Image (tube, rainbow, N blue to C red):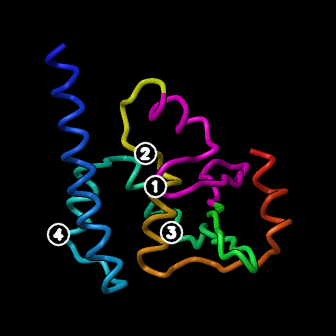
Amino acid sequence: MMSSSGGAGRMSASCLVAETVWKDIESTHKVNDDQLWTLHFLFGKNFEGATRIVDQRGVSKISAHPSGRFIFQVRGESRRKEQYLCFAENFCACYSFFYDVVNRREQLCCKHQLAARLAASLGSYAEVKVSDEELALLLSTI
């Protein structure tokens, strides 16, 4: 039992550190080397993938009018260039999210979530405007 709660404690500490770094990046819309190092330490290969996706302009923010609700659409890195819908902080429609994050609990989040969070923090995403009805229809496909 103790190792289980110890693991949860580490996850919580990691999440807290990550959240602090994200808020710092959001406040300046810039990322420095120390922040990159910290995020890479916390997220490893998923963060590397996320930076590639953001560098290749693979993140869109789909915003609904008039509610202001939004979701991110993130392009995958495979040859097929799938598009994944995700809420940066708590959900992605990709296989890795369900396998590595939810089932095995080996990762805090997938690279698509990280890409969405990084792009949002830097203001580096394409903006797509839709109606509330269009967003509802899009969400029904998840």
The reply to whether callout 3 and callout 2 are in contact (CB within 8 Å) is: no
Please identify the quadrant where the N terminus is shown. top left
Quarter occupied by residue 86: bottom right
| Residue type, mark 2 in image | Cys
Residue 67 location in percent, x, y? 70, 75
- Disc 1 from disc 4: Cα separation: 22 Å
Q: In the structure shown, which secondary structural element does the residue marked by tag 1 occupy?
A: loop
Residue type at tag 4: Asp
Question: Label 2: which residue?
Answer: 109
Q: Which mark is in front, 1 or 4?
A: 1
Measured Cα–Cα span from mark 4 to mark 3: 19 Å
* Residue 54 badge: 3
Residue 53 got which mark? none
Q: Is residue 121 shown left or right of residue 36?
A: right
Camera-near label (1 vs 3) is 1
93 part of magenta stretch: yes
Q: Which residue is found at the position 23% from the left and 54% from the top? A: 16
The residue tagged 4 is 34
The residue sitting at 51% across, 69% down in the picture is 54
Mark 1 and mark 2 in contact? Answer it, CB < 8 Å. yes
Marks 4 and 3, the one that precedes in the sequence: 4
Residue under numbered circle 1 = 89
Identify residue type, mark 3: Val
Q: What span is in magenta?
A: 74-102
Q: Earlier in the sequence, mark 1 or mark 2?
A: 1
> Which quadrant does the C terminus fall into?
top right
| Circles 1 and 4 in contact, beta carbons < 8 Å | no
Secondary structure of the residue carrying numbered label 3: helix
Q: Nearer the viewer, residue 131 or 96?
A: 131
Q: Is residue 7 above or below residue 111?
A: above
